[in-house]
């Protein structure tokens, strides 16, 4: 579904992404793992068009999306969340999601259908699915940090993506919130048939849910493989288990 081929991105000569490659199969949950500063967020920004790679190419469903702007990539079916929660704090949780549901309906040219009614049901369905329906009328800014991050996933779902990209979905969460979020992510893949790409610096979380893991180190891909292949890889063991990042 997604193929990232040897992309590079430098900032003032510093190679933040230095030959990273990645493939994501339809229906898979794929994780990118690496210590802080490894280049995970930059890689996601390259995929979703917030940044353009210096070199390399990115294909989504066999189409080259390397130089497309973010809205065009979103329209093709890639939605994302950000490392820092990105909600409209003065709108209710409901309205936050409804806005993205409506904008998706406009995008697909259904502007003159009775959009609002449809969006209401769809919005409630999404809030229900992520476990926020009882907080639908709360202002987003008044929700706990964990709920705001889940709301952000709900907003991304309003775009009806085929591929959902999540940047450290459990960052700053309590252990209970982390478990709830990872269960949600597993459920999204199963129930909504979504393909999920997420990044994380906590190895334990990743090994629990990912079917394929890409390990990033200093901007480069060390390896991509099954959890077992990654666990048994010597370079990974050196980088993580023996080395400075243990
Ligand atoms: P990660 O998400 O794995 O923690 P990032 O992709 O955020 O890593 O960052 C990788 C490296 O690139 C870091 O050293 C970071 O400081 C640097 N970097 C990221 N974005 C920028 C930017 N816009 N300008 C300059 N340096 C950046
Ligand atoms: Mg990051």
Image (cartoon, rainbow, N blue to C red):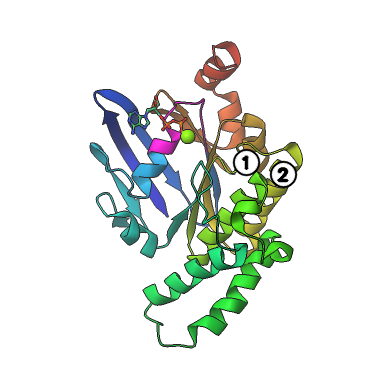
Numbered circle sitting on residue 170: 1
Q: Position of residue 232 (x, y in %)?
A: 59, 24
Vertical position of residue 97 compared to residue 19: above or below: below
Task: Identify the residue at horizontal 37%, vertical 73% (top origin).
Answer: 107
Task: Identify the residue at horizontal 31%, vertical 25% (top origin).
Answer: 15
Q: Position of residue 231 (x, y in %)?
A: 60, 27
Quadrant into which the N terminus falls: bottom left
Q: Earlier in the sequence, mark 1 or mark 2?
A: 1
Mark 2 crowd level (few <14, some 14–19, many ≥20, 10 Å Cα) = some
Q: Is residue 37 magenta?
A: yes
Vertical position of residue 89 compared to residue 52: above or below: below
Residue 197 is left or right of residue 46, and the answer is right
Residue projecting furthest to the front: 90
Instruction: For the residues labelled 1 and 2, say whether their Cβ atoms are less than 8 Å apart.
Output: yes
Query: Would you identify the image quadrant in which residue 152 lies?
Result: bottom right
Vertical position of residue 147 compared to residue 206: above or below: below
Vertical position of residue 123 compared to residue 200: above or below: below
Residue 78 or residue 151, whichever sits in front: 151
Q: Position of residue 215 (x, y in %)?
A: 49, 30
Read off the magenta span. Answer: 32-42
Residue 39 is left or right of residue 241, and the answer is left
How many numbered callouts? Answer: 2
Numbered circle sitting on residue 177: 2
Residue 146 or residue 142, whichever sits in front: 142
């Amino acid at each position: 579904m997604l193929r990232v081929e040897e992309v590079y991105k430098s900032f003032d000569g510093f190679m933040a992404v230095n030959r990273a490659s990645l493939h994501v199969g339809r229906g898979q949950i794929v994780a990118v793992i690496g210590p802080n500063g490894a280049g995970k967020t930059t890689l996601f920004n390259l995929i979703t068009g917030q940044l353009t790679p210096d070199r390399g190419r990115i294909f989504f469903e066999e189409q080259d999306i390397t130089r497309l702007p973010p809205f065009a990539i979103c329209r093709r079916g890639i939605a994302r969340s950000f490392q820092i929660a990105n909600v409209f704090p003065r709108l209710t949780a409901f309205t936050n999601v409804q806005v993205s549901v409506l904008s998706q309906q406009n995008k697909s040219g259904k502007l003159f259908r009775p959009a609002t009614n449809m969006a209401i049901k769809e919005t409630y369905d999404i809030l229900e699915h992520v476990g926020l329906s009882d907080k639908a009328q709360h202002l987003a800014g008044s929700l706990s940090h964990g709920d705001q991050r889940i709301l952000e996933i709900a907003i991304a779902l309003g775009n009806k993506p085929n591929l959902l990209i999540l940047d450290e979905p459990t960052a700053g969460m309590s252990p209970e919130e982390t478990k709830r979020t990872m269960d949600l992510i597993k459920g999204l893949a199963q129930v909504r048939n979504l393909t999920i790409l997420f990044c994380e610096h906590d190895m334990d979380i990743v090994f629990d849910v990912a079917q394929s893991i890409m390990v990033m180190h200093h901007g480069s891909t060390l390896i991509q493989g099954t959890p077992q292949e990654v666990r048994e890889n010597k370079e990974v063991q050196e980088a993580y288990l023996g080395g400075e990042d243990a």
